[in-house]
Amino acid sequence: MRYADYHRRSIELPEAFWAEQAGLIDWHRPWDQVLDATRKPFARWFPGGLTNLCHNAIDRHLPWRAEQPALIWESTEVDQSRSYTYAQLHAEVQRMAAVLRRQGVEQGDRVLIYMPMIPEAVFAMLACARLGAIHSVVFGGFAAMSLATRIDDAQPKVVVSSDAGSRAGRVIPYKPLLDEAIARATHKPDTVLMVDRGLQPYEPVVGRDLDYVAACAAVGGTPVACTWVDATHPSYILYTSGTTGRPKGVQRDTGGYAVALAVSMRDIFRAEPGQTYFCTSDIGWVVGHSYIVYGPLLHGMTTLLYEGTPLRPDAGSFWQLVERHRVSVMFSSPTAIRVLKKFDTAFMRNSDLSSLQRLFLAGEPLDEPTAAWIAQALGKPVVDNYWQTETGWPILSIAGGVEELAPKPGSPGVAMAGYDVQILHDSTGEPVAPGEKGVVAIGWPLPPGCMQTVWGDDARFVGTYWSTFPGKQVYSTFDWGVADASGYITILGRTDDVINVAGHRLGTREIEESISSHTAVAEVAVVGAADAIKGQVAMAFVVPRDAGKMADAAACASLEASIMQTVQAQLGALARPARVRFVAMLPKTRSGKLLRRSIQALCEQRDPGDLTTLEEPLALAQIREAIAHQ
Ligand code: AMP
């Protein structure tokens, strides 16, 4: 079939198209309607249909796949590995579900999961889905303040956590951060379920903390049936950064998500049931939700959960895993590949990669030299794909399962099924001609699997995503893009103050708020600057309260370290700026608006652009000087 026809049908006849795709999953009761359009821009897919994500991910495969590995865990951090067949995963998930149910978790209750990459984290996600509870996984790299904000927003009844994670051989304690976050938060969970890995001793909080092994012993082997939920019932909340300091809870449904992932496994990833899928992301990110846990299991595959870095024990770790587990489909990020690019390609050649069909990369722009290097080193096709936490699955890619369109360098590809991607003029909102830059927007409705709303804040969903172009019902991705005449789109960076560090999205506002809380700071601007490995890094320009400090290099160095420490302790190492530079004033417009784009341009040795509105020209000169002295 021609892909263009396939895609056109998904846009022109969305109900017929998605009704057909819905047959890829099991329904306990068929839906009343494919798409409820009564409250635009909201879109409710398959309302009235009853289903369950866990049933679709595990139970329905049991007659054929009970003895097939479902989940393989490999840790080069603690040198352990474990493997669970579908039957064993079924048993583990039921055990976790029984424990959660005993703690009072019911349909619709929230469970926050703050865990390293261990099998119990996957059990917890699937157990929530089984019960119809809503999970919210918080990335283990986030620190107490970020965690506290999420606890207050999601209001979990139970938190599932662990004593510690491990990164590059170093134990990273989780429990003290969790305790601090709960102390800071207004909402208090009833129970903290602790999976003790024996990495870091901790004192349980009496009456609140529950040891997982003891809790399992108490429930025994009680079976827990799947709770059938409406297709529109939320399956999870995943927080993502925006332009304000307050993260947004992306709320995902159940039925639409399962259908969309199943379609993506067939069309984009071209995966076969029974094969092994290796996604190197983390369960704390959307890529991990969709392609470590739900996508591969919905498709009857074996999924590989990896706790480790690409460089331990050496730069061949990914490829040794591919060989050992006969991985067919692999999904990673451009940053991981740029890290590996510094090493010899012998690390790939030394492993048998004959099972590997394709490598998928996403999360940030894929530069052409990196794409060419890895494709050549592996001797396998490399497929870029562009999406967002909000969409849950790729917006742009090549759906080789439908038609193997040739990739175009620099472009992640064309619009995937159901995405009516438009490139709009930023001020008029009119479509721009091929070759012209505009805002990447998606016409209503967002296809199944995309965010339903911002958790607890419908107005914010409409106000943030659907109000960029008044009078038009389009979702803004907040990315700039340009399309060619054949519909291939190239992404040109964000239109807002969101930055992308190693594929992870950070709001500069969030980092600024954290830095502002430091007592020595009067004012701060944070911008993203291009970085050869991580894509972007955060750069902070700070006006200290005590301007006299600026002349003293040692005082500046110590203040820089202390500001970095503040950000690390509040938000996590991920958000820590690469550099903090001190200036006497920040460049602002006469109306007081920070000229972030000009600062960013200077950081990247570019022209700072139109400066006619600049209040104090000296301010920009100071930024220039601060950069020159780094
Ligand atoms: P996140 O929600 O953290 O996945 O970040 C989504 C953002 O990452 C998008 O809005 C883009 O700015 C960027 N992004 C993701 N994938 C790609 C890609 N393949 N090419 C270019 N940018 C990407």
Image (cartoon, rainbow, N blue to C red):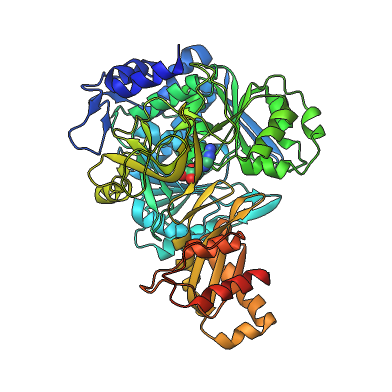
Q: The C terminus lies in which quarter of the figure?
A: bottom right
Q: What residue sits 46% from the left and 63% below the top?
A: 610
Quick check: can you spot residue 78?
Answer: no
Q: What residue sits 66% from the left and 84% below the top?
A: 552
Q: Nearer the viewer, residue 426 or 254?
A: 426
Q: The N terminus lies in which quarter of the figure?
A: top left
Q: Nearer the viewer, residue 494 or 212?
A: 494
**In the drawing, does residue 463 fall left or right of residue 610?**
left
Residue most toward the bottom? 548
Q: What residue sits 77% from the left and 42% below the top?
A: 313
Counting from the top left corner in percent of width and height, residue 266 is at 49, 19
Task: Please say if 277 is above or below 316.
Answer: above
On the image, which quarter does residue 150 sit in? bottom left
**In the drawing, does residue 138 fall left or right of residue 448?**
right
Counting from the top left corner in percent of width and height, residue 414 is at 47, 28
Task: Please say if 282 is above or below 62.
Answer: below
Quick check: can you spot residue 508?
Answer: yes
Counting from the top left corner in percent of width and height, residue 462 is at 27, 47
Task: Please say if 129 is above or below 461.
Answer: above
Task: Please say if 515 is above or below 383.
Answer: below
Counting the numbered discs, the total is 0
Counting from the top left corner in percent of width and height, residue 211 is at 50, 47
